[in-house]
Amino acid sequence: MKILTMNAEHPGHFKVVDDGILLCIYCNYAIKWEKKSTVDDHVRGPVHCAKKAAYEKKQRNGEIRQQRTITSTISIADSKKELIEDLIQALATANIPLEKVNSLIPFF
């Protein structure tokens, strides 16, 4: 079976991330998708059902937070590093001491 087939059999339960990982959106858990029974057992399990109900309740209340993938986390970290490097270069060009950066911390 293919990972996309497993994802299609249970619409809304999973998302495919980072090179073939099937992530349960309710449990924030990577599922071994190679066997259909493993995926089906997870979807029918009491923990998944409870977390699905809690997720849907939070979704109705607007409190949903999704776990980030490793790729997106690295991308965010890289852009933050780039911002810091640009800030240091701008301060150095303007001849402003780096100790003054502490007053800018609330903006980051």
Image (cartoon, rainbow, N blue to C red):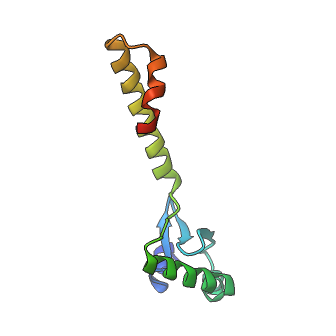
Task: From this view, report whether residue 96 is shown above or below residue 48.
Answer: above
Say which residue appears at 64% left-offset and 86% top-offset: 37
Task: From this view, report whether residue 63 is shown above or below residue 43.
Answer: above
Q: Is 11 on the left-hand or right-hand side of 33?
A: left
Q: Nearer the viewer, residue 17 or 89?
A: 89
Q: Is 82 on the left-hand or right-hand side of 44?
A: left
Task: From this view, report whether residue 59 is shown above or below residue 66.
Answer: below
Q: Nearer the viewer, residue 102 or 51?
A: 102
Determine the image quadrant of residue 34: bottom right
Residue 37 appearing in the image: yes
Q: Nearer the viewer, residue 79 or 57?
A: 57
**Residue extending farthest front:** 103
Expressed as whole percent of the image width and height from the top left, the position of residue 1 reads 54, 79
Say which residue appears at 45% left-offset and 27% top-offset: 103
Expressed as whole percent of the image width and height from the top left, the position of residue 4 reads 46, 75
Q: Is 107 on the left-hand or right-hand side of 37?
A: left
Say which residue appears at 61% left-offset and 86% top-offset: 49
Point out the image quarter for the C terminus. top left
Expressed as whole percent of the image width and height from the top left, the position of residue 75 reads 44, 45
Say which residue appears at 56% left-offset and 85% top-offset: 53
Q: Is 41 on the left-hand or right-hand side of 68?
A: right
Expressed as whole percent of the image width and height from the top left, the position of residue 15 reads 48, 71
Determine the image quadrant of residue 85: top left
